[in-house]
Image: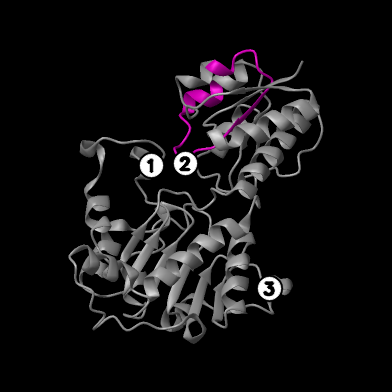
Amino acid sequence: MTKIIMYAVLPAERPYIDHWAQEHQVTVKCVPDRLDAQTVALAKGCDGIDFQQTASLPASVYEQLEAMHFKQLTVRIVGVDMIDFALAKKHHLIVTNVPAYSPRAIAELGLTQTMRLIRKLGYYDQRMANYDFRWSGLESTEIYNLTIGVIGAGHIGGATAQLYQTLGAKVLAVDPFHHADLLPYLTYTDLPTLLAQADVISLHTPLSAETANLVDATFLAKMKSSAYLINMARGGLVDTSALIKALQTNQIAGAALDTLADETQFFERAAQAEEIPDDYLTLKVMPNVLITPHCAFYTRTAMKNTVEMGLDDVLAIIKGQQPRYEVCG
Protein backbone atom coordinates (compact mmCIF):
# COMPACT_ATOMS: atom_id res chain seq x y z
CA MET A 1 0.00 0.00 0.00
CA THR A 2 1.18 3.54 -0.79
CA LYS A 3 2.59 5.31 2.27
CA ILE A 4 2.96 9.06 2.74
CA ILE A 5 4.69 10.80 5.63
CA MET A 6 3.40 14.16 6.91
CA TYR A 7 5.60 16.37 9.06
CA ALA A 8 4.58 19.04 11.61
CA VAL A 9 1.08 17.59 11.85
CA LEU A 10 -1.30 19.54 14.07
CA PRO A 11 -3.95 17.73 16.12
CA ALA A 12 -6.63 19.68 14.27
CA GLU A 13 -5.44 18.19 10.99
CA ARG A 14 -5.79 14.55 12.05
CA PRO A 15 -9.51 14.07 11.28
CA TYR A 16 -9.01 15.38 7.74
CA ILE A 17 -5.88 13.25 7.26
CA ASP A 18 -7.67 10.11 8.47
CA HIS A 19 -10.65 10.78 6.20
CA TRP A 20 -8.44 11.37 3.16
CA ALA A 21 -6.33 8.28 3.88
CA GLN A 22 -9.40 6.07 4.17
CA GLU A 23 -10.99 7.52 1.05
CA HIS A 24 -7.84 6.96 -1.05
CA GLN A 25 -6.71 3.72 0.60
CA VAL A 26 -3.34 5.23 1.47
CA THR A 27 -1.36 4.92 4.70
CA VAL A 28 -0.40 8.31 6.14
CA LYS A 29 2.32 8.45 8.79
CA CYS A 30 1.91 11.57 10.95
CA VAL A 31 4.92 13.16 12.64
CA PRO A 32 4.61 16.16 14.99
CA ASP A 33 8.17 17.37 14.30
CA ARG A 34 9.31 19.64 11.48
CA LEU A 35 11.35 18.25 8.60
CA ASP A 36 15.09 18.59 9.21
CA ALA A 37 18.40 16.73 8.98
CA GLN A 38 17.47 14.45 11.88
CA THR A 39 13.78 13.78 11.25
CA VAL A 40 14.16 13.10 7.53
CA ALA A 41 15.19 9.54 8.48
CA LEU A 42 11.59 8.94 9.61
CA ALA A 43 10.60 9.04 5.93
CA LYS A 44 12.38 5.78 5.16
CA GLY A 45 9.97 3.30 3.63
CA CYS A 46 7.51 5.99 2.54
CA ASP A 47 6.59 6.93 -1.02
CA GLY A 48 5.68 10.58 -0.60
CA ILE A 49 6.33 13.49 1.73
CA ASP A 50 4.21 16.42 2.93
CA PHE A 51 5.29 19.09 5.44
CA GLN A 52 4.62 22.59 6.70
CA GLN A 53 7.07 24.98 8.35
CA THR A 54 8.80 28.30 7.84
CA ALA A 55 12.27 27.05 8.80
CA SER A 56 14.54 26.35 5.83
CA LEU A 57 15.33 22.77 4.89
CA PRO A 58 18.99 21.82 5.46
CA ALA A 59 20.92 20.87 2.33
CA SER A 60 21.33 17.30 3.53
CA VAL A 61 17.56 16.74 3.45
CA TYR A 62 17.45 16.95 -0.36
CA GLU A 63 20.26 14.44 -0.74
CA GLN A 64 18.68 12.01 1.73
CA LEU A 65 15.28 12.21 0.06
CA GLU A 66 16.78 11.38 -3.32
CA ALA A 67 18.68 8.47 -1.76
CA MET A 68 15.35 7.18 -0.41
CA HIS A 69 13.87 7.47 -3.94
CA PHE A 70 11.44 10.32 -3.24
CA LYS A 71 10.15 12.19 -6.27
CA GLN A 72 8.64 15.25 -4.64
CA LEU A 73 8.46 17.79 -1.82
CA THR A 74 4.99 19.06 -0.95
CA VAL A 75 4.62 21.98 1.44
CA ARG A 76 1.04 22.39 2.60
CA ILE A 77 1.13 26.19 2.86
CA VAL A 78 1.43 29.01 0.33
CA GLY A 79 5.01 30.15 0.95
CA VAL A 80 7.90 28.12 -0.44
CA ASP A 81 10.80 30.28 0.74
CA MET A 82 12.02 27.45 2.99
CA ILE A 83 12.92 25.42 -0.11
CA ASP A 84 16.16 25.70 -2.06
CA PHE A 85 14.90 25.15 -5.59
CA ALA A 86 18.38 24.62 -7.02
CA LEU A 87 18.91 21.72 -4.62
CA ALA A 88 15.42 20.38 -5.27
CA LYS A 89 16.14 20.31 -9.00
CA LYS A 90 19.59 18.79 -8.48
CA HIS A 91 18.05 15.94 -6.52
CA HIS A 92 15.10 15.47 -8.92
CA LEU A 93 12.39 16.58 -6.49
CA ILE A 94 9.18 18.13 -7.81
CA VAL A 95 7.99 20.91 -5.48
CA THR A 96 4.31 21.62 -4.88
CA ASN A 97 2.46 23.89 -2.47
CA VAL A 98 -1.13 24.77 -1.55
CA PRO A 99 -1.60 28.24 -3.04
CA ALA A 100 -5.19 28.99 -2.04
CA TYR A 101 -6.28 26.81 0.87
CA SER A 102 -8.37 29.61 2.40
CA PRO A 103 -7.48 33.16 1.42
CA ARG A 104 -10.33 34.42 3.60
CA ALA A 105 -8.73 32.95 6.74
CA ILE A 106 -5.67 35.21 6.43
CA ALA A 107 -7.63 38.17 5.09
CA GLU A 108 -10.10 38.04 7.99
CA LEU A 109 -7.40 38.04 10.67
CA GLY A 110 -5.73 41.00 8.97
CA LEU A 111 -9.04 42.86 8.99
CA THR A 112 -9.65 41.90 12.62
CA GLN A 113 -6.27 43.26 13.67
CA THR A 114 -6.78 46.43 11.63
CA MET A 115 -10.02 47.07 13.47
CA ARG A 116 -8.30 46.58 16.82
CA LEU A 117 -5.57 49.01 15.83
CA ILE A 118 -7.74 51.80 14.47
CA ARG A 119 -10.04 51.59 17.49
CA LYS A 120 -6.94 51.76 19.72
CA LEU A 121 -7.98 48.73 21.74
CA GLY A 122 -4.38 48.03 22.77
CA TYR A 123 -4.30 51.39 24.53
CA TYR A 124 -7.65 50.67 26.19
CA ASP A 125 -6.38 47.27 27.34
CA GLN A 126 -3.31 48.87 28.85
CA ARG A 127 -5.30 51.58 30.63
CA MET A 128 -7.95 49.23 31.94
CA ALA A 129 -5.30 46.85 33.31
CA ASN A 130 -4.41 49.79 35.57
CA TYR A 131 -8.10 50.54 36.34
CA ASP A 132 -8.04 53.64 34.17
CA PHE A 133 -11.37 53.67 32.33
CA ARG A 134 -11.05 57.03 30.61
CA TRP A 135 -11.20 57.23 26.83
CA SER A 136 -9.69 60.73 26.44
CA GLY A 137 -7.08 60.99 23.69
CA LEU A 138 -8.14 57.73 22.04
CA GLU A 139 -10.43 59.02 19.35
CA SER A 140 -10.55 56.57 16.46
CA THR A 141 -11.75 56.40 12.88
CA GLU A 142 -13.95 54.05 10.91
CA ILE A 143 -13.05 51.64 8.11
CA TYR A 144 -15.07 53.39 5.41
CA ASN A 145 -13.01 56.55 5.88
CA LEU A 146 -9.74 54.76 5.17
CA THR A 147 -7.56 54.06 2.17
CA ILE A 148 -6.13 50.54 2.31
CA GLY A 149 -2.92 49.67 0.50
CA VAL A 150 -2.51 46.03 -0.49
CA ILE A 151 0.95 44.92 -1.56
CA GLY A 152 0.56 41.65 -3.44
CA ALA A 153 -2.93 41.20 -4.87
CA GLY A 154 -2.95 37.45 -5.34
CA HIS A 155 -5.43 35.07 -3.72
CA ILE A 156 -5.02 36.47 -0.19
CA GLY A 157 -4.46 40.08 -1.19
CA GLY A 158 -7.50 39.90 -3.44
CA ALA A 159 -9.65 38.51 -0.63
CA THR A 160 -8.33 41.27 1.63
CA ALA A 161 -9.29 43.92 -0.90
CA GLN A 162 -12.81 42.51 -1.21
CA LEU A 163 -13.37 42.58 2.56
CA TYR A 164 -12.24 46.18 2.94
CA GLN A 165 -14.10 47.39 -0.14
CA THR A 166 -17.29 45.75 1.09
CA LEU A 167 -16.94 47.79 4.29
CA GLY A 168 -16.65 50.98 2.25
CA ALA A 169 -12.89 51.55 2.23
CA LYS A 170 -10.93 52.66 -0.81
CA VAL A 171 -8.38 50.01 -1.78
CA LEU A 172 -5.14 50.59 -3.68
CA ALA A 173 -2.97 47.68 -4.79
CA VAL A 174 0.56 47.11 -6.04
CA ASP A 175 1.18 43.90 -7.96
CA PRO A 176 3.13 43.07 -11.13
CA PHE A 177 0.04 41.26 -12.45
CA HIS A 178 -3.26 43.06 -12.86
CA HIS A 179 -6.27 40.79 -12.39
CA ALA A 180 -9.41 42.00 -14.14
CA ASP A 181 -11.69 40.17 -11.70
CA LEU A 182 -10.38 42.34 -8.86
CA LEU A 183 -11.08 45.69 -10.52
CA PRO A 184 -14.47 46.08 -8.77
CA TYR A 185 -12.64 45.98 -5.44
CA LEU A 186 -9.35 47.84 -5.93
CA THR A 187 -7.38 50.29 -8.02
CA TYR A 188 -3.90 49.31 -9.18
CA THR A 189 -1.20 51.89 -8.60
CA ASP A 190 2.55 52.21 -8.00
CA LEU A 191 4.33 51.80 -4.68
CA PRO A 192 5.16 55.52 -4.08
CA THR A 193 1.49 56.44 -4.55
CA LEU A 194 0.33 53.65 -2.26
CA LEU A 195 2.80 54.63 0.49
CA ALA A 196 1.77 58.27 0.30
CA GLN A 197 -1.97 57.65 0.42
CA ALA A 198 -2.64 54.48 2.42
CA ASP A 199 -3.90 54.60 6.00
CA VAL A 200 -3.33 50.87 6.34
CA ILE A 201 -0.71 48.88 4.40
CA SER A 202 -1.32 45.13 4.23
CA LEU A 203 1.47 42.84 3.03
CA HIS A 204 0.58 39.77 0.97
CA THR A 205 3.59 39.27 -1.28
CA PRO A 206 5.85 36.18 -1.29
CA LEU A 207 9.25 36.33 0.38
CA SER A 208 12.09 36.23 -2.13
CA ALA A 209 15.49 37.81 -2.66
CA GLU A 210 13.69 40.77 -4.24
CA THR A 211 11.18 41.28 -1.41
CA ALA A 212 13.36 40.52 1.63
CA ASN A 213 13.30 43.58 3.94
CA LEU A 214 10.90 45.30 1.56
CA VAL A 215 9.65 47.27 4.55
CA ASP A 216 12.87 49.03 5.54
CA ALA A 217 13.65 52.47 6.95
CA THR A 218 13.10 54.12 3.57
CA PHE A 219 9.74 52.38 3.07
CA LEU A 220 8.57 53.33 6.57
CA ALA A 221 9.65 56.95 6.12
CA LYS A 222 7.35 57.24 3.12
CA MET A 223 4.29 56.01 5.03
CA LYS A 224 1.85 58.45 6.64
CA SER A 225 2.56 59.03 10.32
CA SER A 226 -1.05 58.00 11.00
CA ALA A 227 -0.74 54.75 9.01
CA TYR A 228 -0.64 51.15 10.21
CA LEU A 229 1.38 48.22 8.87
CA ILE A 230 -0.25 44.77 8.69
CA ASN A 231 1.95 41.74 7.94
CA MET A 232 0.05 38.50 7.42
CA ALA A 233 2.62 37.13 4.95
CA ARG A 234 6.27 36.51 5.86
CA GLY A 235 8.39 38.00 8.63
CA GLY A 236 11.35 38.48 6.32
CA LEU A 237 9.45 41.14 4.39
CA VAL A 238 10.02 43.53 7.27
CA ASP A 239 13.26 44.91 8.69
CA THR A 240 12.27 44.47 12.34
CA SER A 241 14.84 46.91 13.76
CA ALA A 242 13.66 49.61 11.35
CA LEU A 243 10.04 48.90 12.28
CA ILE A 244 10.78 49.18 16.00
CA LYS A 245 12.54 52.51 15.47
CA ALA A 246 9.62 53.81 13.38
CA LEU A 247 7.17 52.83 16.12
CA GLN A 248 9.28 54.30 18.92
CA THR A 249 9.60 57.62 17.11
CA ASN A 250 5.92 57.74 16.07
CA GLN A 251 6.92 57.59 12.42
CA ILE A 252 3.95 55.26 11.91
CA ALA A 253 0.89 54.71 14.09
CA GLY A 254 1.14 50.97 14.76
CA ALA A 255 1.50 47.46 13.39
CA ALA A 256 -0.13 44.04 13.43
CA LEU A 257 2.26 41.15 12.85
CA ASP A 258 1.28 37.53 12.38
CA THR A 259 4.86 36.70 11.47
CA LEU A 260 8.35 37.81 12.49
CA ALA A 261 11.70 37.44 10.74
CA ASP A 262 13.13 35.32 13.57
CA GLU A 263 9.95 33.41 14.42
CA THR A 264 11.40 29.98 13.66
CA GLN A 265 13.39 30.29 16.90
CA PHE A 266 10.30 30.23 19.10
CA PHE A 267 6.94 30.22 17.28
CA GLU A 268 4.80 27.07 17.06
CA ARG A 269 5.89 25.73 20.46
CA ALA A 270 5.98 26.55 24.16
CA ALA A 271 9.27 28.43 24.38
CA GLN A 272 11.40 29.22 27.41
CA ALA A 273 11.80 32.84 28.53
CA GLU A 274 15.51 32.88 27.75
CA GLU A 275 14.83 31.88 24.13
CA ILE A 276 12.69 34.91 23.34
CA PRO A 277 14.56 37.51 21.26
CA ASP A 278 14.74 41.15 22.25
CA ASP A 279 12.75 42.37 19.26
CA TYR A 280 9.69 40.38 20.31
CA LEU A 281 10.00 41.57 23.91
CA THR A 282 10.23 45.18 22.71
CA LEU A 283 7.26 44.91 20.38
CA LYS A 284 4.91 43.01 22.65
CA VAL A 285 4.72 45.75 25.30
CA MET A 286 3.75 48.44 22.78
CA PRO A 287 0.01 49.21 22.97
CA ASN A 288 -0.05 49.99 19.25
CA VAL A 289 1.43 46.61 18.22
CA LEU A 290 -0.45 43.32 17.88
CA ILE A 291 1.45 40.04 17.50
CA THR A 292 0.01 36.60 16.76
CA PRO A 293 2.09 33.41 16.30
CA HIS A 294 1.66 32.90 12.54
CA CYS A 295 -1.84 31.55 13.12
CA ALA A 296 -3.83 33.44 10.46
CA PHE A 297 -4.30 30.22 8.49
CA TYR A 298 -5.60 28.26 11.49
CA THR A 299 -9.29 27.72 10.67
CA ARG A 300 -11.27 24.54 10.08
CA THR A 301 -11.70 25.36 6.39
CA ALA A 302 -7.98 25.97 5.94
CA MET A 303 -7.00 22.79 7.80
CA LYS A 304 -9.24 20.66 5.60
CA ASN A 305 -8.05 22.27 2.38
CA THR A 306 -4.32 22.20 3.17
CA VAL A 307 -4.51 18.51 4.03
CA GLU A 308 -6.57 17.45 1.03
CA MET A 309 -4.93 19.65 -1.61
CA GLY A 310 -1.42 18.80 -0.45
CA LEU A 311 -2.00 15.06 -0.25
CA ASP A 312 -3.78 15.02 -3.61
CA ASP A 313 -0.62 16.35 -5.26
CA VAL A 314 1.64 13.95 -3.38
CA LEU A 315 -0.44 11.00 -4.58
CA ALA A 316 -0.59 12.32 -8.16
CA ILE A 317 3.22 12.47 -8.36
CA ILE A 318 3.60 9.01 -6.83
CA LYS A 319 1.28 7.70 -9.55
CA GLY A 320 3.27 9.46 -12.28
CA GLN A 321 0.56 12.05 -12.89
CA GLN A 322 0.83 15.83 -13.19
CA PRO A 323 0.24 17.64 -9.88
CA ARG A 324 -2.10 20.62 -9.78
CA TYR A 325 0.17 22.96 -7.86
CA GLU A 326 3.75 22.47 -9.01
CA VAL A 327 6.08 25.35 -8.13
CA CYS A 328 9.10 25.89 -10.37
CA GLY A 329 10.92 28.37 -8.13
Left or right: 235 in relation to 307? left
> Could you give the CA–CA distance between mark 2 and mark 3, rounded to whole angstroms?
29 Å
Which residue does the numbered mark 1 point to in the structure image?
A: 267
Which disc is residue 109 wearing? none
Going by the numbered disc 1, the residue's amino acid type is: Phe
Q: Nearer the viewer, mark 1 or mark 2?
A: 1
55 in magenta: yes
Q: Is residue 301 visible?
A: yes
In magenta segment, residue 87: no
Q: Is residue 239 above or below residue 74?
A: below
Q: Amino acid at mark 3?
A: Leu
Q: Is 298 displayed left or right of 320 in the figure?
A: left
**Which quadrant, please, contains the C terminus?**
top right
Give the percent coordinates (x, y) of residue 206: 53, 55
State the CA–CA distance, disc 3 to disc 1.
34 Å
Mark 1 vs mark 2: which is more N-terminal?
2
The residue drawn where x is 55% and y is 62% is 107
Residue 204 seen in the figure: no
